[in-house]
Image (cartoon, rainbow, N blue to C red):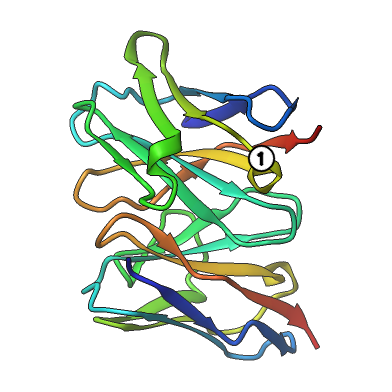
Amino acid sequence: DIQMTQSPSLLSASVGDRVTLNCKASQNIYKNLAWYQQKLGEAPKLLIYNANSLQTGIPSRFSGSGSGTDFTLTISSLQPEDVATYFCQQYYSGNTFGAGTKLELK
Amino acid sequence: QVTLKESGPGILQPSQTLSLTCTFSGFSLSTYGMGVGWIRQPSGKGLEWLANIWWDDDKYYNPSLKNRLTISKDTSNNQAFLKITNVDTADTATYYCARIPITIAAYFDYWGQGVMVTVSS
């Protein structure tokens, strides 16, 4: 089974900050990675697929990068509405989610 | 407009079988490449993928739960189903269904609102 490790588990940042979230796969998953945002009490929302493709309707301040085992989600300028938990998901072999990074305002 | 909505029993007892229904609109599971997946989330915890079903009736299961899961679909009525046998308290969670837009990349682009299921004696 492929394991996904996200870091950090908790991130505090200020409005306007550039924020970087990390996701590491236990084996090569090429670019078979998605990122989701989940706000409190809501279903997850797809942000990024195929490691760096922005889902329709998602603000351009969100971007994804990486391939192989190491991936990054970047928010170029943090907004208050970005407070949420972010999950990565591999779909190279079955599906596995990371444990999530909770993003809060400092 | 793509929408999905889950329904389930709300509460059930240990050892019973959990039956979940996903009713969707805006797409068809008879369309080439399309799929639906089930994912669950215990309160305050992370996401756990359970199973996927595809337009051609191909099915994939989480290996750790495979012997307890059955996924199926009713294409004519735009529904997908998940059964989990022999539930226990660890199966208490919010259960989501979600659309998979393409066979070669099983990410989930639209999600239902989720249905809470409690297993309790």
User: What is the crowding at mark 1: few (fewer than 14 residues within 10 Å), some, or many (at least 20)?
Assistant: some
Name the residue that disc number 1 marks. Answer: B88
Instruction: Tell me the quarter of the image containing the C terminus of chain A.
Output: bottom right
Q: Secondary structure at mark 1?
A: loop
Instruction: Tell me: residue B41, above or below residue A71.
Output: above
| Residue B84 pos. (x, y %) | 52, 32
Three-letter code, disc 1: Asp
| Residue B107 pos. (x, y %) | 36, 53
Q: Nearer the viewer, residue A101 or A64?
A: A101
Instruction: Tell me: residue A28, above or below residue B40.
Output: below
Instruction: Tell me the quarter of the image containing the N terminus of chain A.
Output: bottom left
Instruction: Locate residue A31: give its quadrant.
Output: bottom left
Q: What's the residue at 39%, 76% (across, down)? A: A64
| Residue A78 pos. (x, y %) | 65, 81
Q: What's the residue at 30%, 83% (across, down)? A: A69
Q: What's the residue at 38%, 49% (across, down)? A: B62
Marked residue chain, label 1: B
B9 left or right, relative to A20:
right
B30 left or right, relative to B5:
left
